[in-house]
């Protein structure tokens, strides 16, 4: 039918009912987290563009669509040494939470910023009564998979398959 598989994604889930709060030692935080303001959006786009390969990068419009994908959502930025180094968009629909987009600037990766954003998102979802959180990432994104698994997410048997329609002449 003209569709081609362009990527496969791992789907991960974390149960939140009866789960301890993910709060980590606040003295070892690599960044301070803040609510997103309009003036932060272009910086978020820049981080997204640098953190993801072509085909997976977002612009202002697509980040807005991500934030609007669920009835309830929250966007946070991570700042370190006076500059924004990452962001997270978290959403909730019913009792299910979604880590919709997490991006960390390559210069700040592997310093704990991503994990801090994940923990913050999970705390927010728990406070709002979500009983589970879902996230997906590329099947070959081993660093992200390790981070999510260390944050108590478990891989589901199902994979998400990304298709692209190629028109034939």
Image (spheres, rainbow, N blue to C red):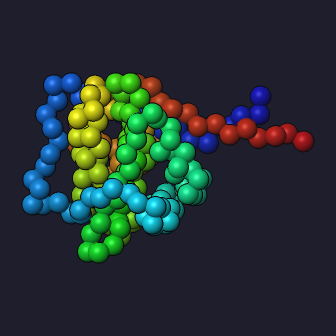
- Image x and y of residue 24, in percent: 13, 49
Q: Residue 156 is drawn in which quadrant?
A: top left
- Image x and y of residue 61, in percent: 59, 53
Q: Residue 7 is drawn in which quadrant?
A: top right
At 55% from the left edge and 57% from the top edge, which residue is drawn? 60
Indicate whether 155 appears above or below 105. above
Residue sticking out furthest to the right: 169
At 57% from the left edge and 58% from the top edge, which residue is drawn? 59
Residue sticking out furthest to the front: 38
Observer-nearest of 76 and 114: 76
Indicate whether 5 appears above or below 40. above
- Image x and y of residue 152, in percent: 23, 36
Q: Is residue 27 left or right of residue 153?
A: left
* Residue 153 visible in the snapshot: no
- Image x and y of residue 69, in percent: 50, 38
Q: Is residue 58 left or right of residue 135?
A: right
Q: Is residue 41 left or right of residue 106?
A: right
């Amino acid at each position: 039918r003209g569709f081609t598989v362009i990527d496969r994604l791992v789907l991960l889930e974390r149960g939140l009912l009866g789960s301890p709060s993910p709060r980590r030692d606040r003295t070892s935080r690599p960044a301070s987290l803040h609510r997103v303001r309009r003036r932060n959006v272009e910086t978020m786009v820049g981080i997204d563009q640098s953190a993801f390969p072509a085909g997976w990068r977002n612009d202002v419009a697509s980040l807005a669509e991500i934030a609007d994908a669920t009835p309830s959502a929250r966007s946070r930025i991570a700042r370190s040494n006076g500059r924004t180094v990452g962001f997270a968009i978290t959403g909730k629909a019913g009792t299910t939470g979604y880590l919709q987009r997490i991006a960390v600037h390559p210069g700040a990766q592997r310093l704990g910023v991503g994990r801090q954003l994940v923990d913050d998102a999970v705390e927010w979802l728990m406070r709002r009564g979500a009983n589970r959180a879902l996230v997906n990432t590329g099947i070959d994104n081993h660093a992200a998979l390790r981070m999510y698994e260390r944050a108590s997410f478990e891989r589901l048997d199902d994979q998400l398959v990304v298709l692209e329609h190629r028109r034939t002449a």
